[in-house]
Amino acid sequence: MRKNWSSSWQKLWTGRGRRRQIELAQAGRFAPAETFEPRVVLSAVSVSQSGAVQLHQQSELAVSARIVNGTQTSDYPAVGLIGESGDHFCTGTLIAPQYVLTAGHCAEGVGNTTGTFTVGRQSYQTERVYLHPNYNRNAIGSDSANDIAIYKLSQQVVGITPMNIFRGIPQVGQLLTLVGFGGGGNGTTGTNGDFGIKRVGTTPIDKVSRTLISWNFDNNTEANTAPGDSGGPAFVTVDGIKYIAGVTSGGDSPNASIGDHSFDTRVDAFAAWITSIAGVTGGGGGGVDLPTLNIVATDAAAAETTVSQTANLGTYTINRTGSTNAALVVSLSYSGAASSGSDYSSLPTLVTIPAGQSSVALTVTPLDDSLAESSESVIATLQSSGAYNLDSVRSAATVTITDNDQTLPTISLRVTDAVAAETRTGQVANHGRFQVTRTGPTTSSMTVFYTVSGTATNGTDYTRLGRSITIPAGRLSATISVSPVDDALSEGTENVVLTLAAQTNYSIDAARGTATVTIEDNETAVRTNDNFADRKLLTGNNAIASGDNRTATGETGEPNIAGVSGNKSVWWAWTAPATGRFTFNTAGSSFDTTLGVYTGSSVTALRLVAENDDADYFGGTLTSQVTINAVAGTQYQIQVNGYDSASGDITLRLNPAATTFAANRLAASRRDAVQIDSVFQTYAEWARRL
């Protein structure tokens, strides 16, 4: 099901605007030997008005599409094909007689009146295409993508019942029913590319984030989505009724085989936006306009009290929208630092809002004990149900219980030396220092716990820190030293973040619970080839150079290799000692590199000779390689950068080019490339439909 397009084109999508990529493809600017990294996979095939599928041209470059491990179905009549001007490339679902729900990347660039929806053997034109206002194609696969859209048709669809959207919160383990027109196949081999057949399959939810539902394709008992399924529905079943809980967005594996991680846009997260356009009000309850629940802490501060004192209770209020004609049973769960039955009276997991009332109060009653404790929380969380929807912002609330026994000491953290540095043998050590301070009596020692994080690695970049420090009796504070470890790596400045950890025998100063020490590297100055003018020299027919680009920066006017931005480039120069073919590569580098070779003496007046992103993406080689026809005495400028600002250690090799046999093979490959030229022309036309 779902996804976007062939992974070999994806970097083009993420690196530049879509229309620009089409122009370059049509101009033959993309050589078939170049490979690119996947991000999201759009389907792209042509489907006639009758629903028959016509691949633009059969070849190994054709985009695959499917529901993997799915079963052909004639059910789900509201699910149809989405496209533009008769060319269909996605799936959509009728949610109202004139409105179709699909993915944002299936609507991007589609004109208001050029979109099409084919369902029930009939094709409908769009009157308006609504792409979510915060859609971000570069963030697909994250909660910031907002990958959702609505097609408004120019006429109503008759004879087909629209599907209801889900307004509850999907749960991990809940079973999804996946429907779409992507190609078939199985988990072992992946998709087979037969787009255009409606299929259905199921998979359990493995993760629910703010705007996404996702799952891991673990084995052949589950189904998965693929290109062509983009925009299609993922249904959940409540009380025997199916509701659209997800819209197919993308996945990580190009062929959607076992091991793929796939994700859908959560429909409930965009329910208000959908309603504002399509006017649908039902969902999660068989098409009835369900009430929406929220919970708030109307008295968030409770406290232990003695029998002679007035009780200090906490209060939650559960509110519902809509009709109050009938009673409504609400399901809750509880969490937090406070313990039910010992810190407060047990609370019910089912609460009834009586008929005639739009809200009900729930009381938190603290239990007094003799323990000295810090303030503890009680978190009440509404649970999903087919009888109501949940307010996605106010589905949980917190009441805090204050202890009435002795006042706990307060622990605070500050930095007394914020800058540490690597030092060599014989130099004075340069440590960083944190200070942990307590309030109250000092008659006994106190152990304070903490956690360590930051960009520096505990035990590698500095002497390992434990998880606690003891303030001795008679003292208010203790010092934690950060002792950098010198190494040969050029790493730039890193940091150590210390955060106090809560315990029952002390409280933490909320404003001073975390602090940071930075560690300066003593190898950074070794790298001198950040700018073009400071490039290092390579000499001879065979050469190898090392370096890094961790602290490198972009230079005004420098080129982007293969159209990929990086801003982490370093430079070398090499004068050819003889005329012939020579190969440069970054094999052995620790990150995803890009590599460019130029002539010219100024960074703003360079002439491209060769460039490469990945030497063999599908084979897992993300370092780079180019071969040039060098002219004796000519100086060539070599630029190494990181894909999307990646950085690390660099190994740059120069060698004479391939053997005569390999050169002959290359010539044969070029002749073969002529034969598939028409494939790329067709591919470019196909990509225009994305």
Image (tube, helix red, strand yellow):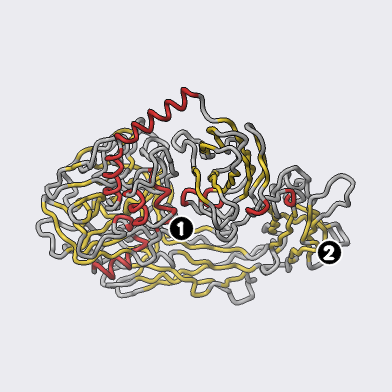
Q: Residue at x 83, y 66 (%)?
A: 441
Side of 511 relative to 108 (left or right) = right
Side of 596 relative to 85 (left or right) = right
Q: Is residue 51 above or below residue 243?
A: above
Q: Nearer the viewer, residue 493 or 101?
A: 493
CB of mark 1 within 8 Å of CB of mark 2? no
- Packing grade of label 1 (10 A; few <14, some 14-19, many >=20) is some
Comes first in the chain, label 1 or label 2: 1
Q: Residue at x 37, y 64 (%)?
A: 390
Mark 1, secondary structure of its residue? strand
What is the x, y in percent for residue 657? 53, 30
- The residue pinned by badge 1 equals 333
What is the x, y in percent for residue 207? 43, 49
Q: Residue at x 15, y 65 (%)?
A: 154
Q: Is residue 212 above or below residue 425?
A: below
- Packing grade of label 2 (10 A; few <14, some 14-19, many >=20) is some
The picture quadrant where one finds residue 436 is bottom right
What is the x, y in percent for residue 602? 59, 55
Give the residue at the far top of this rendering. 661
CA separation in Å, label 1 and label 2: 41 Å
The tag on residue 593 is none
Residue 67 appears in view? no
Give the residue at the far front of this rendering. 633
| Three-letter amino acid code of the residue under disc 1 | Ser
What is the x, y in percent for residue 364? 52, 67
Q: Nearer the viewer, mark 1 or mark 2?
A: 2
| Three-letter amino acid code of the residue under disc 2 | Leu
Q: Nearer the viewer, residue 668 or 652?
A: 668
Question: Which image quarter is the N terminus in?
Answer: top left
- The residue pinned by badge 2 equals 476
